Amino acid sequence: MSNHSTLDDVSVYRLDPAKYAKIPNEVEDALRQRIEELATLNEIGRAISSATKINQLIQLIYEQTTRIMEVSAFYIALYYKEKNELQFIFDVLDGKRQRDEETTRKFGKGRTEYIIRTKKPLLINQKPHETYKKLGIVSADKKAKACVGVPLIYGNDAIGALVVQNYTRNYAYDEGHVSLLTTIANQAAIAIENARLFEKLQEELTERKKIEKRLKERNVDLIRAKKDTDNILNNVKDGLFLIDQDLKIGSQYSAALEKIFEEKSLAGKSIITYMRHKVPRKILTTLKDYLTLSFDQSIDGVSLQMLNPLSQIRMDFSKGQSKSFSKYLTFDFRRIYNNDSISDIIVSVNDVTEQVTLAKNLKESKEQSKKQMEWLFTIINVDRQMLEEFIKSSEEEITFIKTTIDRGTIQKSIDNIYRSVHLIKGNASMIGMGFVAEQAHLIEDMMVLLRDQKSEKREIKENLIKQLENLFDIFDQVKNLIDRSEIFTHNSDLPENMKPIFCLNPFPISLKV
């Protein structure tokens, strides 16, 4: 077999039949062989240009190779440099596929590795093991009498090897077979690499589709979770929000929080900055220290709950320059862990102003009821004539004070008002009505303070008027209690122990000073 045959050899078909008949049988057989080889190469070339599956391509290469060569064993191995491994993707012995699954081994010192390492063909026609020994090849193959192997060259790299063996005779192969297999291997290398890239691309596309599907499913779950979270945050009555390690309010919080905090767009704001001017400075400093400790994992969570400085706090709000109001809020702080570390603090805040106000009013109501009951028992134990003269005299003084207030001449009439209040105080003390005397004494102190001022102080004056009005209200309640005491003093059916014990003072008290 020639090493340099070309497609021009097929021109033999155009020879004159008479001349062709004279060609010796030897030349005829060579031409037929060459034509068969070219047809095989052409068939493989067409298959290579259209094949996208490695297994289909290798099967075709094997079938076409057996048409032009004696083949006892045939295999193709691919080299994966990054893994330093050989993968035997096709292995046939005596026409039978040896493995349905591809076999992998580490790159070593075998015949296949030698071909890949040297990037050169290997032709052995007799006593292969002696040649292996000389070349430093380690092989367990005992059957082969001849073999030929060529590298699969892609670019400058050997990506594998194609090996053919004959188990029946020596000198089964020559340089022509080497050339033929080299041509097949070169084409196959390009096709195999392209097919590998194609399959890799297909795998990546398949994996990408799987990832996209998982992301889509995950996105649906996230949208559903976001919707559920929004529904909770938009409808819960509590103010819920997160505080990060910079003590800033998180991006998501309940809709109720803006109403409770009387402020919008709270995300990203420092909780310390927000609380400034709404709570006392001492509380603000304590809060900052408390939140800092909340991110310290060495601090016990139960102890932190006990140290909460905002368990119930009064916060002052202002709208504009003049309008201000207060709220009573409760705060609860809980740690959030992420990978065993504290990532955030979740805060729950409630507006308890209504409950606190109700409790305060209830307490004041109880105190007022208790006070009125004490007043009532004081009144029913005062001599009736003395009580009536006291009320009559005090009303005259109160009328004078009210007239002075209405005229707006408190500062000019301060001495006269003082005398009237002092008279009420003295008479109240004489008949045992200490609660009236205490209120009058409070007014006296304020009047002394107002009188000592060189100019009329608005704040003192307003407070004085308020206390005078409290005195007027006390007298209104006293008159009401006197009417109620009639039930006791004119009801003969009352038990003896519920009848009033009157002051036994034989001397009439003059209420005029």
Image: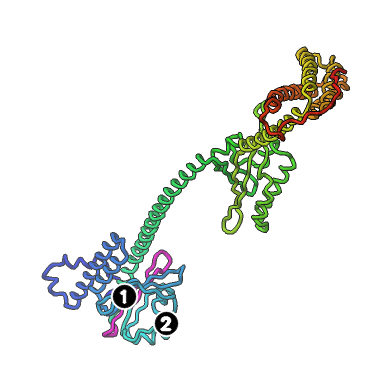
What are the residue bounds of the magenta stretch? 148-171
Give the image location of residue 212, x and y in percent. Answer: 40, 52
Residue 18 disc label: none
Residue topped by disc 2: 137
Task: Rate crowding at label 1 as few (under 14), some (14 to 19) or many (20 or more) other CA atoms within 10 Å.
Answer: few
| Number of the front mark, 1 or 2 | 1
How many numbered markers are drawn? 2
Asked if 492 appears above or below 273 in the picture, the reply is above
First in sequence: mark 1 or mark 2?
A: 1
Give the image location of residue 277, x and y in percent. Answer: 70, 36
Residue 47 appears in which quarter of the rendering? bottom left
Q: Is residue 108 left or right of residue 320?
A: left
The amino acid type of the residue labelled 2 equals: Ile
Residue 455 in sight here: no
Whether pointer 1 and pointer 2 mark residues with C-beta atoms closer than 8 Å, the reply is no
Task: Rate crowding at label 2 as few (under 14), some (14 to 19) or many (20 or more) other CA atoms within 10 Å.
Answer: some
Residue topped by disc 1: 99
Going 44% across and 74% down the picture, which residue do you hit?
Answer: 117
Residue 398 appears in which quarter of the rendering? top right
Going 14% across and 71% down the picture, which residue do you hit?
Answer: 20
Q: Is residue 167 magenta?
A: yes
Query: Seen from this angle, which residue lies furthest left?
Result: 18
Mark 1 falls on what kind of element?
loop
Q: Magenta span: helix, strand or loop, mainly?
A: strand
Give the image location of residue 81, x and y in percent. Answer: 45, 69
Q: Is residue 397 left or right of residue 299?
A: right
Asked if 74 appears above or below 481 in the picture, the reply is below
Q: Quadrant of the N terminus?
A: bottom left
Q: Nearer the viewer, residue 243 or 107?
A: 243
Q: Is residue 476 left or right of residue 233?
A: right
Q: Is residue 92 left or right of residue 441?
A: left
Asked if 196 appears above or below 279 in the picture, the reply is below
